[in-house]
Image (tube, rainbow, N blue to C red):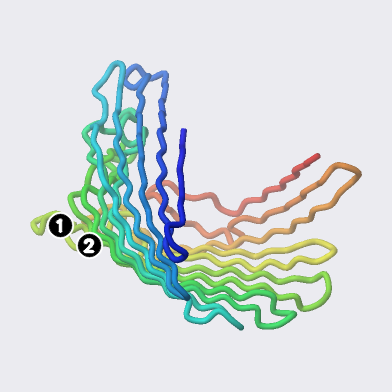
Amino acid sequence: GAAGVAYALLPWLRAAYSTDLSLASMQSNQQTDNHVSRTEWAQALSAEVKTGPFSLTLRGILKTYRNGADQRQAALNGSHTDPSLTLSWTVVERPWRLMLRAGAKRSFRLPTFTESYYHHSGSQSLLPERADQLNLGLTLEAHPAVWWQELRLTADAYANRVKNRIMSVPLNLYLWRTVNQGRADIRGTDFSLSSTWNPSKKHRLMLALNYSYIFSADKTDRSLDSYGKQAAYTPRHGGAASLAWENPVVNAVVHNSFASDRWSTSEHLSQTKLPAYCEWGFALYRSFRTGRVEWNVRADLLNAFNHHYEIIRRYPMPGRAYRLTLALRW
């Protein structure tokens, strides 16, 4: 259950308090983890100062959690406080909108039931993942013309320092283990662009692009071969793009996703390097009504150029594939 209250102390100052109590449980036919539970109580106190184009939000979250297990050791109990600060500045409001933002946050993440209890892979001794996060970003929005309906651009840069990072590492081809990585430093940028055009009546083009750069380095122990190297299965470059054309006859879309090369181990052994990949897909779709029934028909051509690649080493992804989807709503 959840409850909250908010109050405007002054025209430019608001405060809020909320509380949330949750109970989660998992049952399994495995004798080692057939009934586990977690009770979590979260309380949040926040204050917002808003004056003119500036907005400042302060928030503190106190989380207390208790784990239980019937026939095995339960995951660790504990509590933690997460403070955060967010500042935004609307530089320009019209004819286009530009907003700058900055934030600092300390957070922690509990191991999931899978990470704590899953047969062979989970570990009840996992510590919560703790992170100190800094970020800077901007958002640009515009409606340039009648035929150019929307333009939206976002750019973000961040720096995270993570302690006890929860990650799964392969012990062999079939068996993985979830462990804590002592410390990881993460730096990255995210960019997104979306735009909508109306070249003529009943015709619309929609473009969406996103790109991410991430450098996630193990900073646990200088004596380890993995020190300072990119985390396993984490590409430095990745992104996706799509272009859709909506019209009265049949809608069409082309989409793409890509990732740079990466390694299946943190030591970056030459034989564990996975090459970059780029996958393309095409689709036709249409919605129409007959009486009270709405029909949605879609035909997809996936991995259109039959590109062979692996996301997880030695587990090849499907080649060219076809999919037909029919959905009815009434």
- Tell which of 116 and 24 is nearer to you: 24
Identify which residue is drawn at 42% across, 62% down: 13
> Could you give the CA–CA distance between mark 1 and mark 2, rounded to whole angstroms?
8 Å
- The picture quadrant where one finds residue 117 is top left
View extreme (right): residue: 291
Taking depth in this image into account, of 112 and 322 the one nearest to the observer is: 112
Q: Is residue 206 left or right of residue 51?
A: right
Q: Residue 288's spot in the image, x, y percent?
A: 84, 52
Residue lying at 28% horizontally and 38% vertically, measured from the top left: 177
**Amino acid at circle 2:** Lys
**For mark 2, does the 10 Å Cα neighbourhood hold few (<14), some (14 to 19), or many (20 or more) residues?**
some
Residue 125, how many percent across, how many down? 21, 33
In the image, 61 versus 226, the foreground residue is 61
Residue 229: give its label.
2
Whole-percent x, y for residue 262 in the image? 34, 60
Instruction: Give residue 117's mark.
Output: none
Q: Is residue 272 visible?
A: no
Q: How many marks?
A: 2
Above or below 310: residue 259: below
Secondary structure at badge 1 equals: loop
Q: Quadrant of residue 249?
A: bottom right
**Residue for badge 1:** 225
Residue at image coords 26%, 54%? 131
SS state under label 2:
loop
Q: Is the residue under label 2 in contact with that under label 1 (CB below 8 Å)?
A: yes
